[in-house]
């Protein structure tokens, strides 16, 4: 059975290079991109791409945050689509308000856990983790 090859970036001295941004820095960046996403939406998409790309290579604590962030994005998209579909019935505005509050709570809770060096307890939660 052939072994999988690992690719390591090496510096001139032959030692592996440390990443420019730590896992915690990337987790923090994604939370910030999600919060800025309320203003333009594009940054939230960039944030979920970062979370997807880094989730497999991260330490367990950061991995729980990345999983939580990915679920926040995907469930948030579901809330947005359902609220857009029901906006004319009147319930869509309430769902949109719920999505904003829900996303803010998840981002703040994630930031507080990250600051404390803790993983998200239930990253697959539909509520607040």
Image (cartoon, grey):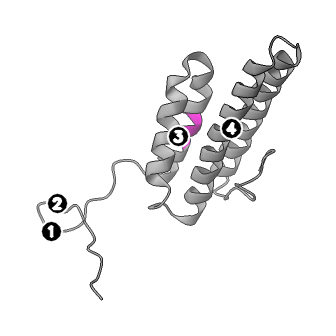
Label 2: element kind: loop
> Considering the numbered disc 4 on the image, is that residue within a helix, a strand or a loop?
helix
**In the rendered image, which residue does mark 4 sit on?**
107
Circles 3, 1 touching at the beta carbon (< 8 Å):
no
| Residue furthest to the top | 88
Any magenta on residue 99? Answer: no
| Residue 122 makes an appearance in the image | yes
Report how far apart the C-alphas of labels 2 and 3 lie in the structure: 30 Å
Gap in Å between the C-alphas at discs 1 and 2? 5 Å
- SS for callout 1: loop
Tag in front: 3 or 4:
3
User: Residue farthest to the left?
Assistant: 12
Q: Are marks 1 and 2 in contact (CB under 8 Å)?
A: yes
> Of circles 3 and 1, which is in front?
3
Q: Which residue is mark 1?
A: 14
**How far across and how far down the image is residue 20, in percent?**
33, 48
Q: CA distance from mark 4 to mark 1?
A: 39 Å
25 or 70: nearer the eye? 70
Between 125 and 16, which is closer to the camera in this rendering?
125
| Number of numbered discs visible in the structure rendering | 4
Q: Nearer the viewer, mark 4 or mark 1?
A: 4
């Amino acid at each position: 059975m052939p072994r999988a090859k690992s690719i390591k970036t090496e510096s001139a001295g032959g030692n592996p290079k440390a990443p420019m941004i730590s896992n915690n820095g990337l987790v923090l960046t994604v939370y910030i991109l999600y919060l800025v996403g309320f203003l333009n939406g594009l940054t939230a998409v960039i944030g979920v791409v970062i979370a997807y790309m880094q989730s497999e290579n991260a330490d367990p604590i950061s991995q729980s945050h990345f999983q939580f962030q990915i679920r926040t994005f995907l469930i948030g998209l579901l809330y947005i689509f359902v609220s857009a579909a029901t906006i004319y019935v009147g319930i869509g505005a309430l769902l949109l308000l719920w999505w904003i509050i829900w996303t803010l709570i998840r981002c703040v809770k994630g930031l507080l856990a990250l600051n404390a060096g803790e993983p998200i307890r239930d990253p697959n939660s539909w509520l607040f983790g």
